[in-house]
Amino acid sequence: MLNPLDKIKTQVKRLSAYTLNAPECRVKINQNENPYDMPEEIKQEVMKRLANRPWSRYPTFVPVDLLVTMAKFSSWRADGILAGNGSNELIQALLTVTVGQGTKVLISEPTFTLYRLLIEILGGEVISVPLKSNLQYDTDLIKQTAKEKEVDLVIICSPNNPTGCVIKDSDLIDLLKDFSGLVILDEAYHEFSKHSVVPLLKQFSNLIVLRTFSKAMAMAGLRVGYLLSHPDLAKEIAKAKLPYNLNFFSLTAAIVTMENFHLLSPIIDKIIAERERVFVALSKIPGLEPINSQANFILTKTSIKPSDLMARLQTKDILARDVSRYPMLNDYVRFSIGTEEENNELLETLKQTFS
C-alpha cells in the first residue's frame, strides 16, 4: 500500500518543526516583544485610514506607498526593498532562491533556530561556527571557515538572538571584502543597539539586511518585516515571495508607524534603560550570571536547572524562555525586558528563588 509520507523529503522527516510551548501567564517575557502597546494616536490614525478603504479589494500588487515610506525611513532605495509577512517570510524567500542541494550556508551558533531549519529543508548544508566562550562573535573563525569550506552564504544575526551580542562594523566589512558569496545580516533587534549596518549597502552589493516591525516597532501581532539589498538581488528574491503577502491592515499600520516613529522612540529608550537596570540587578543575585546584551532581552546563566527555574517562575505567573537546548547554552534562560512593574516582579521572584 502506498505510504503518502514517502513523498516527503527524507531530510524534512528527520527535522523537528519550529514550535513554541507558551502557556498563558500574566507576566509574559518569553518572546522578545515590545511590552508596551502601540501609542493610541497611531492606532486611531490606522483605523481612520482603514475605514475609508474598501475591504473587498486586494491591496495594491506592488505596495509603492509602503516601499517609498520604508525607503525614507531606512535611508535606502525603494527598488532595493521587499516587504514581507514578518521578516521570517523574507528569510524563507531569500533562502528559497539561494539554497539547493549541497549549498553551504555558514551560521554562527547559538542563534535563531529558523535559519538552520529552513536551510536543511531546502537541502542545504549548514556550516556551524561556534561563538566564543564569552558568547561573542568569533569573526576570525567565521572568515577562516567561510574560505576553507567555500561557503555560499553567511547569516549573522546582530544583535544576536538569544545572546544579544553584535558584530562590529569593522569585522563585517572585513568579511564582506574577502567573501564572494552573500552575507545576510538580520537586524531584528537593531533599534535596541542604536546602530544599523544599512549604510554599508552602498559599498557592498553582496550584503542583505533584514528588519522587522515585531520587536521595537510594537507590531508583533500584525506581522510585517522588510529586506534591504542591491536592487538586482531584491528583484530575484521577490520571485519567491507570495503575491499580496501583506494584508492592507498591516500595510497601513506599518506606514503610519514609520510616519510617527517619534512616538515610539521614547518607548524604545525606556526599554533600553530597563535592560541596563535589569542587567545590574540580575548580576547581584547569587546563582545568576547575565550576559551583556544589545537587544531587548538578557541571556542569563543559572545555577538552577533551566526547566526547574521556568517551572518555579510559572507558579508566580511569569513566563520566560528556556534556551538550554541551544548549542553552548545548557545552563541558560532568556528574559525579555518587560515593563518596569513586570521586571520588578521578575527580579523579586528571582531573589526569593535563589536566596
Image: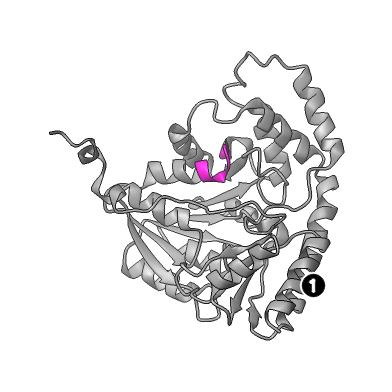
Residue 203 showing in the rendered view: yes
Q: What type is the residue that disc 1 sits on?
A: Arg
Q: Is residue 29 left or right of residue 175?
A: right
Question: Is residue 320 or residue 117 the one in the foreground?
Answer: 320
Give the class, few, some or many, for how many residues have Cα within 10 Å of label 1's Cα (few <14, many ≥20): few
**Is residue 334 depicted above or below 43 in this figure?**
below
- The spot of residue 245 in percent (x, y) is 54, 30
Q: Pick out the residue farthest to the front.
A: 315
- The spot of residue 307 in percent (x, y) is 53, 69
Report the quarter where the N terminus lies. top left
Question: Is residue 343 or residue 119 the one in the foreground?
Answer: 343
Picture quadrant where residue 157 is located: bottom right
Q: Which residue is under mark 1?
A: 277
How is the protein colored in the picture?
A: one colour
Residue under the image location 78 percent in, 16 percent down: 52
Q: Pick out the residue farthest to the left.
A: 1
Q: Is residue 39 left or right of residue 227?
A: right
Looking at the rendered structure, the secondary structure element under dot 1 is: helix
Report the quarter where the C terminus lies. bottom right
Is residue 111 covered in magenta? no
Question: Is residue 352 or residue 331 the one in the foreground?
Answer: 352
Residue under the image location 36 percent in, 56 percent down: 152
- The spot of residue 270 in percent (x, y) is 83, 60
Q: Which residues are magenta?
A: 80-89
- The spot of residue 354 in percent (x, y) is 68, 81
Residue under the image location 75 percent in, 22 percent down: 50
Residue under the image location 62 percent in, 14 percent down: 57
Q: Is residue 53 left or right of residue 151?
A: right
